[in-house]
Image (cartoon, rainbow, N blue to C red):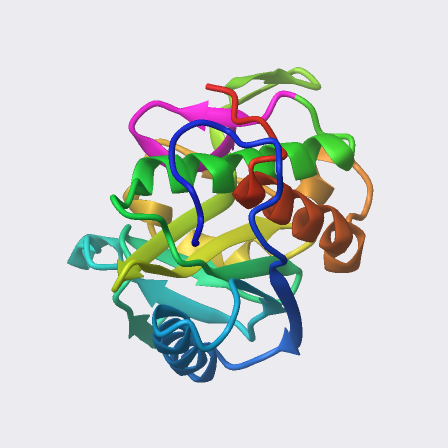
Amino acid sequence: MGFQQGSIRKAKIRDIDIRDLGTVDYEETWHLQADLAAQRAEEKIPDTVLLLQHPPTYTAGKRTEDSDRPTNGLPVVDVDRGGRITWHGPGQLVAYPIIKLADPVDVVDYVRRLEQALIQTCEDLGLHGTGRVEGRSGVWLPAGVINNELKPARKIAAIGIRVTRGVTMHGVSLNCDNTMEYYDHIVPCGLADAGVTTLTEELGRDVSVSDAYSSLSRNLVDALNGDLPVHS
């Protein structure tokens, strides 16, 4: 029995294997995901979540347009996930759930659970008011005046997934204390009218990947098992 779509369940479905990979090359990890997803589809391994960081890397999803691509000449890895272009790098906590979804597959429900895990992680770390923006993936802070400065809506966590043979790949990235420099050279997620931010920037204190690690891993497991209610 795999991940159950639809209503939230009280009981845990199964243990989820959490793997800490440290800092790993993007393409190497992409191949690892594909291998694990194939094993999961054949019931050779349990549901698994990979937690990691990447060296600085631009990745472009299937909807990326030429105008989104970096202006600094750095290479881009074109990948098989949804969404457009984004950046991964040190100070950003990345999670790749390799989860077998129940049939019929409900991708929207799965994404909502990932979003809820990220929202709860921000709450745990003291950042309140994060949520969803209609028609846009990921987790956001709304536009508003902060310290006498008008700020646009800004994304603090990105989501991009692929489902193959009923098993998920790719996943989420949470900006902890990473640099913003690399975002200046792309149109992040193809959204020219929005910003990107970090936990450190919003909270006014350093929030590292290690600070967010246990919270995000716990909240992902709880969300996928149905122990963390999903709010609209």
Q: In this view, which residue lies farthest toward the front?
A: 1
Q: Is residue 183 visible?
A: yes
Tell whether 185 sits left or right of 196: left
**74 lies above or below 142:** below
**60 lies above or below 103:** below
Q: Nearer the viewer, residue 77 or 231?
A: 231
Q: Nearer the viewer, residue 199 or 112?
A: 112
Q: At x 62% / y 37%, what residue is drawn?
A: 11
Position of the N terminus, as image quadrant, is: bottom left
Magenta-drawn stretch contains 138: yes
Magenta-drawn stretch contains 170: no
Q: At x 57% / y 39%, what residue is drawn?
A: 223
The dominant secondary structure in magenta is strand
Q: Position of residue 10 (x, y in %)?
A: 61, 31
The residue range painted magenta reads 129-140
Q: At x 43% / y 34%, what residue is drawn?
A: 112
Q: Position of residue 80 (x, y in %)?
A: 25, 66
Q: Nearer the viewer, residue 125 or 217?
A: 217
Q: Position of residue 44 (x, y in %)?
A: 45, 77
**166 lies above or below 151:** below
Q: Is residue 74 visible?
A: no
Tell whether 45 sits left or right of 227: left
Find residue 32 and report its image quarter.
bottom left
Number of marks in the rendered image:
0
**18 lies above or below 211:** below
Tell whether 108 sits left or right of 2: left
Tell whether 97 sits left or right of 207: left
